[in-house]
Amino acid sequence: MAESFTVHFVANYWRHILGIILPLLILYVIRSFFTRKRDTPETNRSPSELPEEHPLAEFRDAQPTDKDSDLPTAPLSPLHAEDTEQMPYVHVKHTEEEMIQRSQEFYKLMNNRRSVRMFSQQPVPIEVIRNIVHTAGTAPSGAHTEPWTFAVVQDAEIKSKIREIVEKEEYINYDRRMGDKWVQELQFVNTNYEKPYLDEAPYLIVVLKKPFRIGPDGTKHVHYYYEISTAISTGILIAAIQNVGLVTVTTTPMNAGVAIRELLGRPEHEKVMLLLPVGYPAPDATVPSIKRKPLNDIMVLK
Ligand code: IYR
C-alpha cells in the first residue's frame, strides 16, 4: 500500500521533485567549490594550483615528478619556535668615512668583474675554491634551509664529459631550438655552441638547487624560496671569485641539467641551475666592450 503510494507520488510529481532537488544539488556543488578554495591555506595548496605570478609558484618545481613523489611530506623543523636560543649579534662597526671608503673600494672591485670565457690552464689551489664555496654558503635562505649544493669538478675527464653534454644541446639551441632572434640578440657576446671554458678552466662549479630535502627518516621537507636563495648564494660566490682575482662566466646548461646531474651522481631532487668555470683569465683574454647603466638609471630615491 505504502509502496504503491510512493510509486504513484513519484510518477505524478517527479518534475516538482527534480525541480527542488536539482537546484539544491547545484548550490551545494558551487558552495563546496568556493569553501575549499577559501579554507585551504596558501602554503598547503598544491603548488600546481598556484598562479604563475604567485610568490610560492616556484613550488610547482618542488612537486617531484620522479620516484621521490611517493615520499611522505614532513614540515620543516620549527626553527622559530619559542624555545630557539638567541645569541648576541657580533657587529663590526666602521666610522662613516670608513664606510664610504669601503663601499667605494668594493664597488671598484666588483665593477671590474666581467664574464670571461677564455681561461688559462694555470692551476689554482683547492683551498681558495673551498673558501669561495664556504663564503657562498653564508647566503641567507628561506627558513634557513640552505637549499644548495656546489659540485666542484676538478677531474679533467668529468669536465670534458660535461662540455660534451652542454655542446650537444647548445648546438641544437643555436641551430634551431632558440630561433634567429635569440641568435642575433646574442651576437655581441660573441658566443656559439662551443664551450671550451667548460674543460679548460681548472675548476667547474656546478650549482644545484634543492626544492626539498629528504630527512634521515625518509620524509620530504619542502624548501621555501629555494630558487631565490640559491641565486643569492651564487651572487656571493661570484663576488668571492672576483675578490681573489679569478674569473668566471655564469653558464646556463639549457636542457643539459639532468645528464650533468646523473654524471655527477647527484640525487634526483637536486636540479642543476648554473655552471661556473673558475680560474685565471687567459693572458690574451678579451671581453665585449660594454657599458653599465649609470646609477641614476638603476636607483630611485624616494
Ligand atoms: N647560453 C648560451 C647563450 C647565451 C645566452 C645569454 I641570455 C647570454 O647572456 C650569453 C650567452 C651560451 O652560453 O652560449
Image: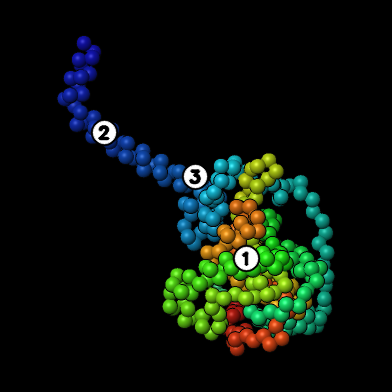
**Which residue is disc 2 drawn over?**
20
- Position of 298 with respect to 203 (left or right) is left
Q: Is residue 133 above or below residue 27?
A: below
Front residue of this view, candidates 225 and 23:
225
- The residue that mark 1 highlights is 161
Dot 1: within a 10 Å radius of its alpha carbon, few (fewer than 14), some, or many (20 or more) residues? some
Identity of the residue drawn at 68% across and 87% down: 284
Labels 3 and 2 touching (C-beta < 8 A): no
Q: Quadrant of the C terminus?
A: bottom right
In the rendered image, is residue 147 in sight?
A: yes
The image position of residue 223, as x and y in percent, is 63, 53
In this rendered view, identify the residue nearer to me: 120 or 49. Answer: 120
Sooner in the amino-acid sequence: mark 3 or mark 2: 2
Front-most of residues 263 and 127:
263
The residue type indicated by label 2 comes to Ile
Question: Residue 228 location, x and y as percent?
Answer: 61, 63
Q: Earlier in the sequence, mark 3 or mark 1?
A: 3
Q: Residue at x 23, y 29 (%)?
A: 17
Q: Earlier in the sequence, mark 1 or mark 2?
A: 2
Q: Label 1 amino acid?
A: Lys
How many neighbours does mark 2 have within 10 angstroms: few (below 14), some (14-19), or many (20 or more)?
A: few
- Secondary structure under badge 1? helix
Q: Secondary structure at mark 3?
A: helix
Of the residues tagged 3 and 1, which is closer to the observer? 1
Residue at 60% across / 52% down in the picture? Answer: 268
Residue, disc 3 = 39
Mark 2 element type: helix
Farthest-out residue, left: 12
Would you identify the image quadrant in which residue 152 lies?
bottom right
